[in-house]
Structure formats: structure tokens, C-alpha cells
Amino acid sequence: MVAKAVGVLTLLSLISAIVVTVEADYVRPPPRPTLRFPWNPKPSSHPNQICSVILDKTNLQSQVHISLAGENHIRITWITADKYAPSIVEYGTSPGRYISVAQGESTSYDYLLYSSGKIHHTVIGPLEHDTVYFYRCGGDGPELQLKTPPAQFPITFAVAGDMGQTGWTKSTLDHIDLCKYDVHLLPGDLSYADYVQGRWDTFGELVQPFASARPWMVTEGNHERELIPFIKDGFESYNARWKMPYKESGSSSNLYYSFEVAGIHVIMLGSYADYDEYSDQYWWLKADLLKVDRTKTPWLIVLFHVPWYSSNRAHHGEGDGMMAAMEPLLYAAGVDIVLAGHVHAYERSKRVNNGKSDPCGAVHITIGDGGNREGLAHRYLYPQPEWSEFREASFGHGELKMVNSTHAFWSWHRNDDDESVRSDHVWITSLVGSGCVSERRQVRRKNLLAV
Ligand SMILES: *[C@@H]1O[C@H](CO)[C@@H](O)[C@H](O)[C@H]1NC(C)=O
Ligand SMILES: [Fe+2]
């Protein structure tokens, strides 16, 4: 009898699982509770999981993450409680044999009653492409491994924004871990610390197994701001902990920068830095776009936090000011793909410019569904705009595989499904390949950008 009931229940849940995957309007899961620290009291099988308690004297290093830092270089960031700990990284291509050593720098900050640990930033390189390196922080830490990105196509990006540190975040990270990716792109809203500084530390621990193994390239969201009028400028914790290659890319602010990897030029803009035509960010963007050489980097990708094309009711219109100022530049330069977050849902547009679909505009993707505690943004505008191709409020992540100089494969994966299930997927052909970035347009582009 019991067995029969269990059987019926299993059957019912199987049926509902099938219905869930075919129905666009299924009943969506509620937010999951915030995770309790320590994350993983049992020893983990993950090679890069080293700590269970943050900033304990017995655990010398914590919160290791890595980022690209100029051609063939990687920045290693970690935190120690010990303020005399050295900022050195030893590394090599065989386990336990560190044939190189790099000396870095360190910083720390105070925030009301909180004092951060010593935050180390050490750049290693030049490194070989597509190679596993074994490394050790601070001279006595446990051994970690990282893999450098390939020199050429194919290369895969994992993409998830608005992460937070809930059960859904963990689910997103576990799904991402199953995909073979080279670089993680995060369009803002990392820890949801929201002034509680210890949450930056627990977030650093949560993502370490992933972020210490592959470069994590991030830009800022509103939850990084932590502004206290007259007392604290915004982004102090974020800038201290998540130092990105802004100096390497000629920017004067950690809030916007660019980098190149395997035939792709990626620009990380700041939704929370000034963007009008008199701003430093605007001028830096023009200069950076002019430097792009499409024969060397046929793909041009841009990330920022607040989406310009979203038909969700949440945050609707918030990106309009930045869009008015900067979309003409991106269009003139022939940007292929724009990735944004902020809205806790998924949406993908056709190629679009100035509010209408346009074969020479960018594909805009909102991927703010990483799993934070605020939950999903369910309410949409009707009718669905002509440029909106796919929209759904579920937690998940994206994978962007740049196959070659003309073809990229984008897929979106719900956390409710197995990693292998793609709930949305599309081939994207590059603007260079489609002739939108032709000689004639190059001249127009130079003229516009030179103003
Ligand atoms: C790029 O990849 C696509 C999809 O696999 C393929 O159809 C196309 O022929 C490739 N182009 C080149 C130049 O290799
Ligand atoms: Fe946000």
C-alpha cells in the first residue's frame, strides 16, 4: 500500500517535472533561505576547497579568487587574518614544484566597526595558454590549481549575475561547475553584503572552489555600492576585494575596464559610475572602442548591471539614461552581445538598436537569475515587445561558447533541470561575419567615435 502510494507520488512528480519543462508559465520556485556558514563542514572533494572557517589563525588563507590581468597574466587575490603574511604566490605546471614566484601588493579597509583582513593581490605570469598551473599563496598555503584560457577559439564563458549566497546560489554554482568553462563573467551584484561586511567574507568562501580555479571577471551592481552619505564613498569593499584589470586597460576606475581573451574584446561598464558625455567613463569607452582591432578580436562583448532591453516590470526604465548616452557608441563600434543583470529573471533579445530590432545591433541578454535572497522578478510587460525573443523568471545561468570568429552558441540552463538541459539556446553570428562591420561602416565608426 505504502509502496503503491510512493509509486504514485513518484509518477506524479515525474509528470510535473515533464510539464515544467514544456510549459512556459509553470509555478516557479520561491527563494531559498540564505546559507548558513560554514558552508561545508565535511571535507569536500573539490580540489580547490581549502577552508571551512574564515580568517581563523589555523586557516592561513581564505577567499582565493583569480582574474585576468593583462596579456598572459593572472591576478591572484586572497585574504589573511595575519597582517604580516607575505603577498607572494609560488606556481608551476607540476604539483608541488613551484619554479616561479611573484610578489604582490596588499590592502585592507575599515567599515564602521568592521576591520577587513589583509587583502593580497599578486599578479603571476607570463603564463602559457590553456595550461593547468599549481599554485600556493603566502608561502605556506595549501596547493590550488587554475587553468588559463586558450589562446584561440573555442572558448566558453559561464555567465551568472545577482548571485547572493542562498541555496539557489549554491545550485547555480553546482550547475556551472558541471559545464566546462574557461572564464566566468558576472554582470554585477555579487555577495549581497548590503553593509554587513562579514557577508563579503562568507561570499568569498562560497565561491572560492570555482573562482580560484577559473578567472572570474566582474563588474559592479547596486548591491556593491554600500554608500553612507558623508561617511563612506561607494564601492570601498568591492574595490578592495574584487580588483579588476582597470589599470591594465587604461581606465582610472575599478568600476569600468576591458580585457581581451582568445579573439574576444570584453568591455565591463559601470552602471553606477557617471556615464554622460562629459564623464571619464564615456571618454574611456570611446578610446577603448577605437583600440579594438576586429581582425585580432572579431567578437566584441559588453557587460554592465542595469539592462537596457528588459520587458520585466522590475526596474523598468532604470537603464534608460545610460542607454541614451552610450548605445550610439556601442552601435557605431558594432558590439555583438550585451550581458546585463539586476532584473532577477532571464531575457534574450533579437539584435536590437534604438528600441527596434536591427540586424547590426547587439543581442541583449539579461541574466540576473543567479540565486540571491530577493527572489525572482515574475511580472512582465504585455504585449511582449517585438525585440524580445525569450523571457522567463527562473534561477539559472548562461553559457556562451565562442566557437570560431563568426559563430557563437548561447544557452541558458535552469537550476531546476539537469545541467545538460538547455531551456533556451541560439546560434549567434558575429557582426564582422555578417558585414555590419565593413569598411564603409569602419569609416562611419571612426567619424562618430572621434567626435
Ligand atoms: C564556424 O563554426 C560554425 C558552426 O560550427 C561552422 O558552421 C562554420 O563553418 C565555422 N566557420 C569557420 C570559418 O570555421
Ligand atoms: Fe541589482
Image (tube, grey):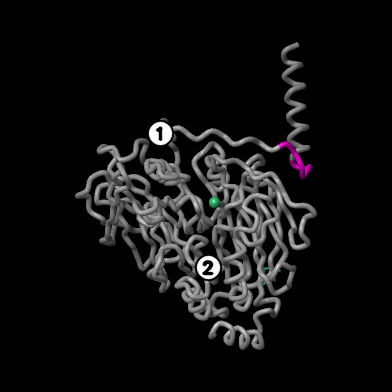
Residue nearest the observer in this picture, 151 or 425: 425
Residue positioned 65% across, 65% down in the render: 408
Q: Which part of the image, by quadrant, shows the C terminus? A: bottom right
Q: Disc number at residue 38? A: 1
| Horizontal and vertical percent position of residue 69 | 40, 65
Q: Is mark 2 on a helix, strand or loop?
A: strand
Corner quadrant of residue 123: bottom left
Q: Disc number at residue 53? A: none
In this figure, which residue is indicated by the disc labeled 2? 266
Q: Which residue lies furthest to the front in this view?
A: 230
Query: Residue 49, can we see it?
Result: no
Residue positioned 64% across, 58% down in the render: 317
Stretch in magenta: 21-27
Ligand 1's image quarter is bottom right
Which numbered disc, 2 or 1, marks the residue that appears first in the sequence? 1
Secondary structure, magenta segment, majority class? loop
Q: Which amino acid does label 1 sit on?
A: Pro
